């Protein structure tokens, strides 16, 4: 694997000569810029004599107060158009051979043809003399008519193409309505994905809906609640691979309690919902407590674990 410097040198040596079109590259221009030597023989860069932003020669920096494109300048003009006369001059100096060769060839062709005809006509009889002007007359009109014809055909093509572009349809103002996103509406007991913090979304149950205070949700994962949520802070669960279980769907479900310090283990049955808890009655096991309240998230976790054990068995 080459480093950046070695790879750049490899490209300049192997590939650039194959695709180079003959014009001076940026590397060559930079090299010419530092070809000037000072008194000590050190390379130095030519001083800039104009501003590269606006093209004026009374300053060289874009942050000068004389630059009309400097926003902090008192003469700032956002509509200022830089003078493009400098660019063609640079191009002509870069490619002098191509620019001078074409006009020179054209100039030498026309004088040779015009001078040869009169010379031969002068030595011949009047019949030949009349023929030469005829040839000259036909040559000149052909040249003069061809150029305007080409220009005339070029200009109409450009002008006719612009009007033919299809215009966007204009709709009446009474039919144009702003597009507003359709947010789902949730009811008490629905499952959703609620926003806990920024970029933190978790499965939740809607426990309260109020027009003034928004939504109140319960997170079964940790038993926490959050109030005053907006509608855009709740998302639907339709796109989930496994649909979540509604809290009301577990009524009359039986589950195993492993036991605690103040409650004996045994089987319990879900009877009803009170707030964010299930009221469960004991089916098996000892102890004097036959009814107790359990967190909804805890009961759902016990039922999920039991189904996972049955699936693995």
Image (cartoon, rainbow, N blue to C red):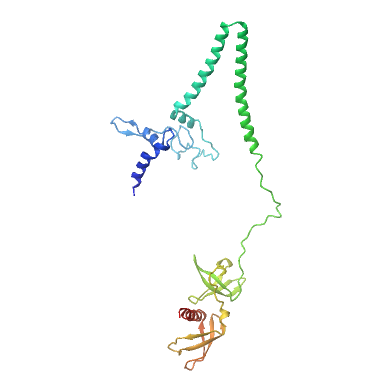
Give residue 280's position: percent from left, percent from top. 53, 87
Residue at the limit of the structure toward the left, as seen here: 40
Nearer-the-camera pick, 286 or 229 = 286
Question: Can you say which quadrant of the picture contains the C terminus?
Answer: bottom left
The answer to whether 229 appears left or right of 8 in the picture is: right
Residue 17, quarter of the rendered image: top left
Question: Residue sitting at 62 percent across and 8 percent down?
Answer: 127
Nearer-the-camera pick, 227 or 99 = 99
Residue 158, quarter of the rendered image: top right
Nearer-the-camera pick, 245 or 216 = 245
Question: Residue sitting at 51 percent across and 87 percent down?
Answer: 268
Give residue 161's position: percent from left, percent from top. 64, 38
Q: How many marks?
A: 0
Work out whether 283 lies above or below 170: below
The answer to whether 299 appears left or right of 4 in the picture is: right
Work out whether 55 lies above or below 188: above
Work out whether 205 lies above or below 160: below
Question: Residue sitting at 62 percent across and 14 percent down?
Answer: 134
Work out whether 232 lies above or below 252: above
Give residue 252's position: percent from left, percent from top. 56, 85
The answer to whether 53 appears left or right of 190 in the picture is: left
Question: Residue sitting at 52 percent across and 18 percent down?
Answer: 109
Give residue 167's position: percent from left, percent from top. 66, 45
Residue 129, quarter of the rendered image: top right
């Amino acid at each position: 694997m080459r480093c950046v410097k070695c790879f750049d040198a490899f490209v300049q040596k192997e590939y650039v000569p194959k695709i180079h079109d003959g014009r001076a590259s940026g590397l060559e221009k930079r090299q010419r810029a530092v070809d000037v030597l000072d008194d000590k023989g050190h390379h130095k860069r030519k001083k800039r004599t104009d501003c590269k932003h606006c093209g004026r020669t009374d300053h060289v920096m874009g942050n000068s107060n004389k630059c009309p494109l400097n926003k902090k300048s008192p003469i700032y003009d956002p509509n200022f158009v830089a003078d493009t006369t400098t660019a063609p001059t640079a191009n002509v100096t870069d490619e002098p051979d191509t620019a001078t060769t074409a006009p020179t060839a054209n100039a030498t062709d026309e004088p040779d043809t015009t001078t040869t005809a009169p010379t031969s006509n002068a030595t011949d009889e009047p019949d030949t003399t009349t023929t030469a002007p005829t040839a000259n007359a036909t040559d000149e009109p052909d040249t003069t008519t061809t150029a305007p014809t080409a220009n005339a055909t070029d200009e109409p093509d450009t002008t006719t193409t612009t009007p033919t572009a299809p215009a966007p349809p204009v709709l009446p103002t009474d039919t144009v309505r702003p597009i507003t996103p359709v947010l789902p509406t949730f009811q008490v007991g629905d499952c959703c994905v609620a926003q806990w913090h920024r970029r933190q979304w978790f499965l939740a149950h809607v426990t309260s809906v109020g027009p003034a205070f928004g939504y109140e949700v319960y997170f079964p994962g940790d038993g926490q609640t959050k109030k005053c949520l907006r509608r855009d802070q709740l998302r639907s669960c339709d796109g989930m691979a496994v649909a979540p279980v509604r809290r009301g769907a577990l009524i009359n479900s039986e589950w195993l309690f492993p036991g605690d310090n103040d409650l004996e283990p045994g089987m319990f049955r879900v009877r009803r919902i009170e707030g964010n808890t299930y009221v469960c009655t004991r089916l098996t096991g000892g102890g004097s407590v036959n009814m107790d309240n359990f967190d909804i998230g805890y009961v759902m976790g016990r039922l999920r674990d039991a189904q996972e054990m049955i699936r693995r068995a």
